[in-house]
């Protein structure tokens, strides 16, 4: 009976540890657990189909075309195999493999028998196909519009004629084209462009000599419009001032030439600060730095023209749901199209460059010219923007920050803490016996009233759970397991001994 009670108590402790990890972690940060659950759901949907087709990316593209709204036209998921064959899947899950030009011609009539010539057709490619062997795309039917399926979204592929020839881009927004040079950089660009811009973490700065030497931790809100106001800051102290806006996004307007950021204050001649100092400070203080390049870099003021510009672009509820992609698309609309390229920097950061489509690749230093109309100039507070450059955290760094429960403490330390705490809960009896030697339980006779006695008990329990259990959790769990195993083994020996004793014949 005692052994069964001990085992029951052990299962109770296991349940408590599971509840601790199930409630403590999501209560503070549910991102990483929700990601795990979403991945599990996706695997659960894809795995049965992957066993039939054998290509997970093709199954993902096939699942995407099934989710397209009615009226989107005929659609096929397509994937090029390493052997050079094409596999197509329709909305019903039928698969057609083509290895010759004649078989490619039969793919559409076979999978889409009701499609008439000239009707709308979308061919949704896997990322492996797009970045694996792009030369095979020429074999696809010319009547279809090509898309690439990335994650849960798809983006049309557009070819533009450049000075060096034709180039293919993914149109992530109507006026925003992303380069297709490298798959890892393309995925990084999508994660950055689809990331929401939180209204409380966007800071639009005006560089004004004699302005505030520091920045407040939170933006100032206009009481009438409820829109964040522009922060006026002294450019001489700007690198140091970024320390108070850690984790936020800062927008600065200027013209870059020879590592100098030039700007026009509200009064006086043009001035400059070192761009390298600003970028180093942004990296040190984990700030997303957005540079709005302008030929005449007048500083914004009086209103947050960033959000006005996004709302003028016709976005629904832009103040709450705008993304970096929406913002760049709204800027690109006035001049035609923006070409976006992504490069990796040191210390878990990336650089995103959005330049006019026909600009020189990757070089936006000193870019000037008549790129924007007068209407755009008036809307943006008479700041004529020629390009946008973003220096931000990469997706891995952002994911690590999102996983944190306590800001400023690395995620791996917090996860290790919770795991050790859970192990300590499972080894509670052993850990409590060890703790009693360090901090003996309180005695009621030592306290003048019940309140002091209960307060001391609460402090002792808090120190035991929050400090002692995570430290000794793993050794206590191991020791508890050994004791449980020994208890079960000795119970078995005692049971066998009692059995043999009863079986022995009684002597006179």
Image (spheres, rainbow, N blue to C red):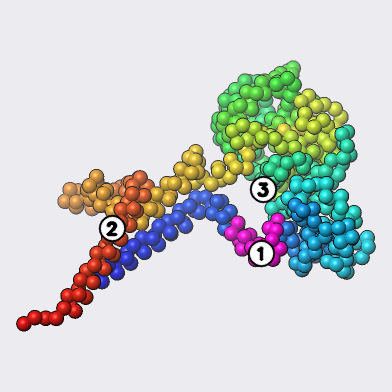
Q: Seen in the image, is 286 located left or right of residue 159?
A: left
Count of all numbered marks drawn on residues in the image = 3
Tell me where residue 118 appears, x and y as whole percent: 93, 60
Query: Does dot 1 land on a helix, a strand or a loop?
Result: helix
Query: Does dot 3 land on a helix, a strand or a loop?
Result: helix
Name above or below for residue 296 compared with residue 73.
above
Q: Is 49 covered by the magenta stretch?
A: yes
Q: Residue at x 40, y 62 (%)?
A: 15
Q: Residue beneath label 2, please? A: 483
The dot on residue 171 is none
Nearest to the eye among marks 1 and 2: give it.
1
Give the camera-side residue of 474 and 267. 474
Tell me where residue 123 appears, x and y as whole percent: 82, 57
Q: Residue at x 23, y 53 (%)?
A: 450
Name above or below for residue 346 compared with residue 131.
above
Q: Residue beneath label 3, please? A: 320
Give the camera-side residue of 316 and 266. 316
Query: Does dot 2 land on a helix, a strand or a loop?
Result: helix
Give the overall secondary structure of the magenta segment: helix
Q: Is 189 covered by the magenta stretch?
A: no
Q: Residue at x 87, y 52 (%)?
A: 139
- Whichever of labels 1 and 2 marks the residue nearer the N terminus, that label is 1
Q: Which residues are magenta?
A: 38-57
- Whichever of labels 2 and 3 marks the residue nearer the N terminus, that label is 3
């Amino acid at each position: 009976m005692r052994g069964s009670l001990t085992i029951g108590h052990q299962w109770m402790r296991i349940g408590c540890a599971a509840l601790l990890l199930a409630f403590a972690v999501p209560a503070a940060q549910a991102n990483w657990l929700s990601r795990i659950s979403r991945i599990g759901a996706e695997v659960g949907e894809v795995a049965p189909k992957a066993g039939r087709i054998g290509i997970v990316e093709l199954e993902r593209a096939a699942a995407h075309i099934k989710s397209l709204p009615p009226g989107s036209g005929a659609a096929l998921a397509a994937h090029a195999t390493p052997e050079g064959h094409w596999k197509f899947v329709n909305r019903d899950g039928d698969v057609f493999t083509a290895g010759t030009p004649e078989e490619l011609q039969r793919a559409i009539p076979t999978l889409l028998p009701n499609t008439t010539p000239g009707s709308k057709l979308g061919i949704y490619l896997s990322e492996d196909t797009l970045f694996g062997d792009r030369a095979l795309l020429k074999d696809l039917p010319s009547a279809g519009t090509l898309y690439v399926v990335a994650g849960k979204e798809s983006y049309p592929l557009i070819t533009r004629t450049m000075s060096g020839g034709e180039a293919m881009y993914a149109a992530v927004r109507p006026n925003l084209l992303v380069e297709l040079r490298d798959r890892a950089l393309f995925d990084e660009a999508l994660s950055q462009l689809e990331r929401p811009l939180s209204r409380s973490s966007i800071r639009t700065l005006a560089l004004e000599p004699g302005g505030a030497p520091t920045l407040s931790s939170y933006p100032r809100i206009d009481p009438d419009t409820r829109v964040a106001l522009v922060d006026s800051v002294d450019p001489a102290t700007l690198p140091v001032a970024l320390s108070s806006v850690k984790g936020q996004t800062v927008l600065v307007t200027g013209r870059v030439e020879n590592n100098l950021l030039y700007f026009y204050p509200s009064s006086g001649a043009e001035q400059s600060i070192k761009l390298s100092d600003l970028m180093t400070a942004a990296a040190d203080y984990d700030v997303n730095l957005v540079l709005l390049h302008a030929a005449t870099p007048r500083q914004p003021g009086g209103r947050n023209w960033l959000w006005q510009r996004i709302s003028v672009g016709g976005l629904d509820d832009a103040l709450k749901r705008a993304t970096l992609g929406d913002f760049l698309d709204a800027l690109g609309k006035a001049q035609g199209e923006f070409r976006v390229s992504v490069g990796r920097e040191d210390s878990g950061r990336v650089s995103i460059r959005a330049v006019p489509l026909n600009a020189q690749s990757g070089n936006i230093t000193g870019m000037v010219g008549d790129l924007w109309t007068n209407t755009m100039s008036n809307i943006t507070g008479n700041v004529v923007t020629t390009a946008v450059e973003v220096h931000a955290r990469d997706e891995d760094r952002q994911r690590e920050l999102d996983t944190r429960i306590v800001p400023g403490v690395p995620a791996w330390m917090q996860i290790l803490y919770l795991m050790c705490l859970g192990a300590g809960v499972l080894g509670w009896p052993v850990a409590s016996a060890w703790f009693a030697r360090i901090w003996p339980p309180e005695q009621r006779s030592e306290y003048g009233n019940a309140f002091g006695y209960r307060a001391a008990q609460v402090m002792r329990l808090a120190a035991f759970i929050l400090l002692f259990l995570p430290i000794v959790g793993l050794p206590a769990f191991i020791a508890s397991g050994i004791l449980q195993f020994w208890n079960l083994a000795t119970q078995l020996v005692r049971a066998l001994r009692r059995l043999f004793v009863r079986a022995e014949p009684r002597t006179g």
